[in-house]
Amino acid sequence: MSHLLASRFNVSTLQRFNILISTWMLAAQAATAASLLATGPMPVARDSHTATLLLDGRVLIAGGFDGTNAMASAALFDPLTGAWTATGSLHTRRAWDTATLLLNGQVLLVGGSRGTNAYDLVLASMELYDPATGEWQLTQLGGDYRTEHTATLLQDGQVLVAGGATSSTTLGSTELYDPATQTWRPTGNLNNPRYAHMAVVLPDGKVLVAGGWDNFGDWLSSAEVYDPASKSWTLTGSMNVARVASSATLLPNGKVLVAGGTLSPDYYDTPTAELYDPATGTWTLTGALNTARDYHTATLLPNGKVLVAGGEHIDAFYVSYLATTELYDPVTGTWTNSAYNNSLGAGSSATLLPNGQILMAGGVNDYVIEQLGGLLYDSAEGTWNPVATPNAIRNVPTTTLLPNGHVLLAGGFDGTNALASVETYDPASTSFIPAAPLNSARDSHTATLLPDGEVLVTGGSDGVQALRSAELYDPSSSTWKTTSAMKAARESHTATLLLNGNVLVAGGGAGDNSAELYDSSTGIWSTTGSLKEGRELHTATLLLDGKVLVTGGYSSKGYLASAELYDPVSGTWTLTAPMATARFYHTATLLPNGKVLVAGGNGADPSAELYDPATGTWAATGNLITRRDSHSATLLPDGRVLIAGGYGATAYTGAVEFYNPASGSWLAGTTLSNALSFHTATLLPSGQILFVGAYSTTNGTLPCAQTYDMGLGFDPAWRPQIDTITSPLALGTALTLGGSGFRGISEGSSGYSFQSSPANYPVVQLRSIESGCTIMLTSSNCSASTFTSGPVTRLPPGWALATVFVNGIPSLSSIISVMASAAPAMTLSNTRILANGFFEFSFTSTPG
């Protein structure tokens, strides 16, 4: 920011700098939290900090400047929950340092300043952050004290630190850090000492360094390349414009985009941008920014465009902070103003998250240090694509994602009769294939994917009466077989796969409060505790602790606001706090943070609320944009919930909207091609969502199917690919993946301006197909073709989707079997018979 623009060799500049920083410090003392598509503010306001995307998808914010001094605090942001939490503090206060994610998942901080500006009390120390413990390890840098340097992760896992400044001089020295030995060694000098420069890893593994200030406070246009093989620096073509505090972004075509920055003399910002071509070693001017800026952020989006955000505009020392954003299109070489504007300013960090959104954090705006924390690029863009028409009209069918990636459509209602017909959807051919029919026609039934891969269908109505019967679909033979009948006939009931592999069936029928359990290993039903209130058209959600939350529905009393919890251990139901609104035909979605989102229902009610299992309470979370019931709700891989279709206030609707748990906000999306109600929505391994149902026309009711693509717009060739994966996976053991593209073809950003820590490494997600429970995996070993996680826990047994994200681009998901870990053998010791005939012993148990 402008406080860094002071040349140490220019007295008039220092005078201006002192006036500016004094004004800034006074304003910073009265700083208040700001919002930006709010995720909630960071715990502490800061700028000139580091931001690092961890291997488990969280973002580590460390150090920074609070307007008076460098800081030691650190915080974590979880994009799936939207929550900020404090983590271990640094051993040394520091800002203007660098942060680099190592291949073992730890974060390396190097140098910086612990004083009142970038050149006050410069540091030689480094610290390592361990995400597993949340603690920092302090160690010493092997060479120079330095600030405003660059730190670059090489392909072999070592870190190249180049240039920077001390309190009195500019550095030309460079060093290599080896994480395996935790040692430093020199690796030659830059041809031009420089600080506040840019560094980018090129596709061939070499490192491009460009721009910055030299030892005399002059702006540099020179550039040079480091070759890790020869450990040498070679001058390459110079930029057309000497610049400082600009951005540098590696594009998918292998070229480097440099944009903006400050010029000499008199500190004017430039709107110019240019491209470096590694093949020729030359720079070419490209389209200019619409607004000249420096200390902005630049982020490569999944579609290959570059989003430049915020920064400051300097015109002969007059500083204005920017809230505007611009998009660069490499195809046309032009910039367009983007609509994603807000209170941004300079010195904030921009981190590309696994879901393609960008986390903006901190910074300075109008001389006020920000607590800002928000999602800048919260896109609801997407496209609806028609697929082949289903073979039958189906309202209220069941759709089940099978282990082979196909979708099973069973039963339903065609407007006149309950259906026995079945078909499967093949995502590869986008076609529906007739399959063996059910043994009994049925609608308003349930379908549950069991741990062995079979599908259990229970109850429903045959058009005349509710059914007790149940049957199993075997995907390997594409056949149906009957299994034992339920204790009670049920329709519009719920079926929930429990952690032990059994299925809980509850309610069905306005006055039915019975519940029963299906043992998937024996095929036998047994009664369990009764609901506190009979109900149908309710929802049942498996919570992270293994309990089941049942909400709303219809009873002999009318529509219900009540909610209750089933405890599989005791087999009993307990009332929990009621919802604020009575609901039926609503949806309930387990969010990654463990809360449950209940939305709509009750004759097109617009309200939504969140249930918190930790407190057993409900909280409003804003109204739906469109009133609806009989809609669908789908948890997306990016953690948002897609609400689509349903019955509106007066008619069927095709309206679509997204709920973002990170911000607690609703955002309208692209409308369905056909209005649907009583339909199903199924997340496919491709990341698309299949919608199946029926819609009405002037000529009657017609079958309909369409898929939704979230619209990230990436080239399919950029997508990571899973070739091998651990399946079955026993809980408590590691998941190993093999494939390609686990390191992106280009670099997403993490950090700000020249101190950006590129993020082009794999982040892996597991999501339970039945419950929606979603976790991100830690890793101690990843490469361009492999990923090995730590022990996998907190996921229910059954089938799960495994997805690799790199630079916001998801792989095609692999479907894996997740198995409960084997119970450890228990050893008894100190056994003895007591005088009174009792006996005693000791034993040691293993958690879980």
Image: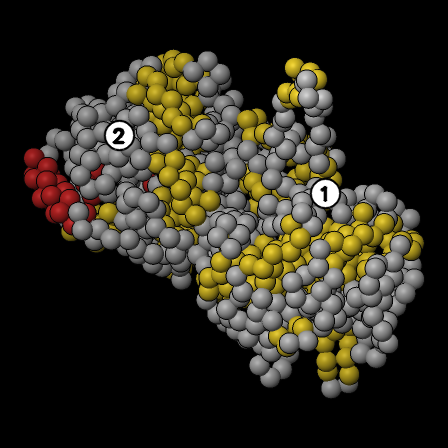
The crowding category of the residue bearing disc 1, from other C-alpha atoms within 10 Å (few below 14, some 14 to 19, many at least 20), is some
Please indicate, yes or no, whether residue 282 appears anywhere in the rendered image.
no
Side of 737 relative to 33 (left or right): right
Residue drawn at x 46%, y 13% as measured from the top left: 181
Residue drawn at x 71%, y 72% as measured from the top left: 510
Question: Dot 2 lies on which element?
Answer: loop
Side of 748 relative to 838 (left or right): left
Side of 205 relative to 151 (left or right): right
Q: Are marks 2 and 1 in contact (CB under 8 Å)?
A: no
Question: Dot 1 lies on which element?
Answer: loop
> Residue 654's image quarter?
bottom right
Task: Measure how far apart labels 2 and 1 are at the Cα level.
Answer: 49 Å
Side of 141 relative to 166 (left or right): right
- Across and down, in percent, residue 437 comes to 91, 62
- Across and down, in percent, residue 315 comes to 18, 51
Q: Which residue is mark 2?
A: 93
Establish if 169 lies above or below 796.
above
- Across and down, in percent, residue 37 comes to 40, 58
**Mark 2 or mark 1: whose residue is earlier in sequence:** 2
Residue drawn at x 18%, y 51% as measured from the top left: 30
Query: Foreground: 518 or 473?
Result: 518
Q: Please identify the quadrant where the C terminus is shown.
A: top right
- Across and down, in percent, residue 450 comes to 78, 48
Establish if 466 lies above or below 744.
below
Q: Which residue is mark 1?
A: 500
Q: Please identify the quadrant where the N terminus is shown.
A: top left
Residue drawn at x 36%, y 14% as measured from the top left: 186
Establish if 808 lies above or below 468.
above
Label 1 is placed on what type of residue? Asn
Establish if 760 lies above or below 567.
above
